[in-house]
Image (tube, helix red, strand yellow):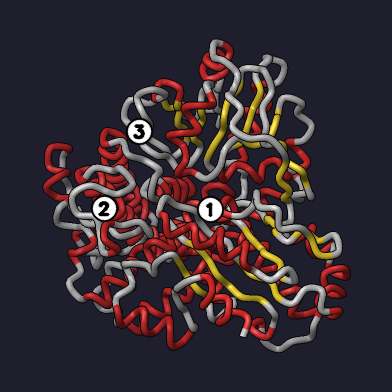
């Protein structure tokens, strides 16, 4: 195996024996083969659109299977074998559909679009199609940067699709870009242009998901979220999928089973549609990487709707259920029924037999500062900026992770001047959302917009402030970007911000290993991308 798609990749260069995330080498290789096959399918999808073929099932298939390869989503070898088998079937069926519609497929000669293999041959085949198959370091770097951005797009697109929202334009780009990463005729300059185009569609897909979420569940509201527990048996829901959240709340109503959110599900507490459920208690625990400790103490079953799953300990493994793109050998998987619904009765009955959660903390945290809320406070915010009460905003969105070096973000938040405000989204918030940082004229100093995809809200807020202050350039705003990243959804957020013209973004705790020196140089010179050093020096740099 060779994998360097996440921030915690071994030695900051690449995992080669086993993933730091916990995935085995053979599973990593099978993920590579699945992606390779999806790229082959995409070649026929691109050709098909020329003759009017827009296959919704193929669109969905590519999206959800790309999602399955995101870090900490799926560790199940058998599941990936099944996915590859299905991918080969889908590819051949689409090829025939395109031919039947009058499309010319004779020029599609790439191996990804034509290879056939049985299960016994998958492992051997997988070893030949991984990241290192691209010899040129810069081309490889750009191909992977695009691919990881597309994984993030697929994740957000799939969440929107689950709520009945999709865009053929986004599907078309996703597939065009996947196919392009195997096109040896494209130069580094061509791929840089495609990278920026990926950012444009990243903005589009996050806007689509925002529309899906808010149209379905209402606009997030300023909400105080309970972080304590009650004395009832309960289910803990983690991941990101709000449709799963809705179904679980509906099916647990009146059963005596409480529901708590965990990690990136915390923002579900901000949506009006979910507040009507009396058995929706609040949030339990912290960021994804503390699962081993917190899942143990929760006592009841856990539903993983998306990444981020940590390989579970034997002591609570029998209480973890997966759904959607998530998979782990030995865990029970709740699949979608033919009617599009999921039956959570098994996990509900399991919960009834479990002890209530062990309390690990008490109190409240406040959130719900998505764009609709913040823009409703625009006059108050603008006045605070004009009066000098707020000197600067710091966008500290992104991901949390295991590395001790991430304590930097806690210390950075503590050290920020009292006249600054943190804008956050994603699980990076857990590094500082429970600190007593106070407020500025009633405006909390930590404004949590929601999940990682709600970084879109932060962009909308910035663009609105640019308009209000009548500025020509978004970079003239008193906003600094100190973003923590971990996995591929953070990549699409970064590319989206670059497309919107945001410069001088600082990424940490380390820069991505998949950026070759030359590609990193392009990002530094064109966009001012930088890393982090230490709190004191970085604060001086940001506040200069």
The disc label shown at residue 328, or none? 3
Q: Is residue 132 left or right of residue 233?
A: left
Q: Nearer the viewer, residue 131 or 269?
A: 269
Which of the two labelled residues, at mark 3 and mark 1, occupies the earlier sequence position?
A: 1
The residue where tag 2 is placed is: 32
The residue where tag 1 is placed is: 157
Give the CA distance from mark 3 to mark 1: 23 Å
Q: Secondary structure at mark 3?
A: loop
Q: How far from the left and from the top, in percent, is residue 491?
A: 46, 64
Q: How far from the left and from the top, in percent, is residue 500?
A: 59, 76
Mark 1 Cα within 10 Å, few/some/many (few <14, many 20+)? Answer: many
Give the CA distance from mark 2 to mark 3: 17 Å
Residue at position x 70%, y 81% in the image: 477
Q: Nearer the viewer, residue 54 or 446?
A: 446
Which of the two labelled residues, at mark 2 and mark 3, occupies the earlier sequence position?
A: 2
When asked about the image quadrant of residue 225, the answer is: top right
Residue at position x 77%, y 35% in the image: 275
When asked about the image quadrant of residue 429, the answer is: bottom right
User: In the rendered view, would you say 21 is above or below 421?
Assistant: above
């Amino acid at each position: 195996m060779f994998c360097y798609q996440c921030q915690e990749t071994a030695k900051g260069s690449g995992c080669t024996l086993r993933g730091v995330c916990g995935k085995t080498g053979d599973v990593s290789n099978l993920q590579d083969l699945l992606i390779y096959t999806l790229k082959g399918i995409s070649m026929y999808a691109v050709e098909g659109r020329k003759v009017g073929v827009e296959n919704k099932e193929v669109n969905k298939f590519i999206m959800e299977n790309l999602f399955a390869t995101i870090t900490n989503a799926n560790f199940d070898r058998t599941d990936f074998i099944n996915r590859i088998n299905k991918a080969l079937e889908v590819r051949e069926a689409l090829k025939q559909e395109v031919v039947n519609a009058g499309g010319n497929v004779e020029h599609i000669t790439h191996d990804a679009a034509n290879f056939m293999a049985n299960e016994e041959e998958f492992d051997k085949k997988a070893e030949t199609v991984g990241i290192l198959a691209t010899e040129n370091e810069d081309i490889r770097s750009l191909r992977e940067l695009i691919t990881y951005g597309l994984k993030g797009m697929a994740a957000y697109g799939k969440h929107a699709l689950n709520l009945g929202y999709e865009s053929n334009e986004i599907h078309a780009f996703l597939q065009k870009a996947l196919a392009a990463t195997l096109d040896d005729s494209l130069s580094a300059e061509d791929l840089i242009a495609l990278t920026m185009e990926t950012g444009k569609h990243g903005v589009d897909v996050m806007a689509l998901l925002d529309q899906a979420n808010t149209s379905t569940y209402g606009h997030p509201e300023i909400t105080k979220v309970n972080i304590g527990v009650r004395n009832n048996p309960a289910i803990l829901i983690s991941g990101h999928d709000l449709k799963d959240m809705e179904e679980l709340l509906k099916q647990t109503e009146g059963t005596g089973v409480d529901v708590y959110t965990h990690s990136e599900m915390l923002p579900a507490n901000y949506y009006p549609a979910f507040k009507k459920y009396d058995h929706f208690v609040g949030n339990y625990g912290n960021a994804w990487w503390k699962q081993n400790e917190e899942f143990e103490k929760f006592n009841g079953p856990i539903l993983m709707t998306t990444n981020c799953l940590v390989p579970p300990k034997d002591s609570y493994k029998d209480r973890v259920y997966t759904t959607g793109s998530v998979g782990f050998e030995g865990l029970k998987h709740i699949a979608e029924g033919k009617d599009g619904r999921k039956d959570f009765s098994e996990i509900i009955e399991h919960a009834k037999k479990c002890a209530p959660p062990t309390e690990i903390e008490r109190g409240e945290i406040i959130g719900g500062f998505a764009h609709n809320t913040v823009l409703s406070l625009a006059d108050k915010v603008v006045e605070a900026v004009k009066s000098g009460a707020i000197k600067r905003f710091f966008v500290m969105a992104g991901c949390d992770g295991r590395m001790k070096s991430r304590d930097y973000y806690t210390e950075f938040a503590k050290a920020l001047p009292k006249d600054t405000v943190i804008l956050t989204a994603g699980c990076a918030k857990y590094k500082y959302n429970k600190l007593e940082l106070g407020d500025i004229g009633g405006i909390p100093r930590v404004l949590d917009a929601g999940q990682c995809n709600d970084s879109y809200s932060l962009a909308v807020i910035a663009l609105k402030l640019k308009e209000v202050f009548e500025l020509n350039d978004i970079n003239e705003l008193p906003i600094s970007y100190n973003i923590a990243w971990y996995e591929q959804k953070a990549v699409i957020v970064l590319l989206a911000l670059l497309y919107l013209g945001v410069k001088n973004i600082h990424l940490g705790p380390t820069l991505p290993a998949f950026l070759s020196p030359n590609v990193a140089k392009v990002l530094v010179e064109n966009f001012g991308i930088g890393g982090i050093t230490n709190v004191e020096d970085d604060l001086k740099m940001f506040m200069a």
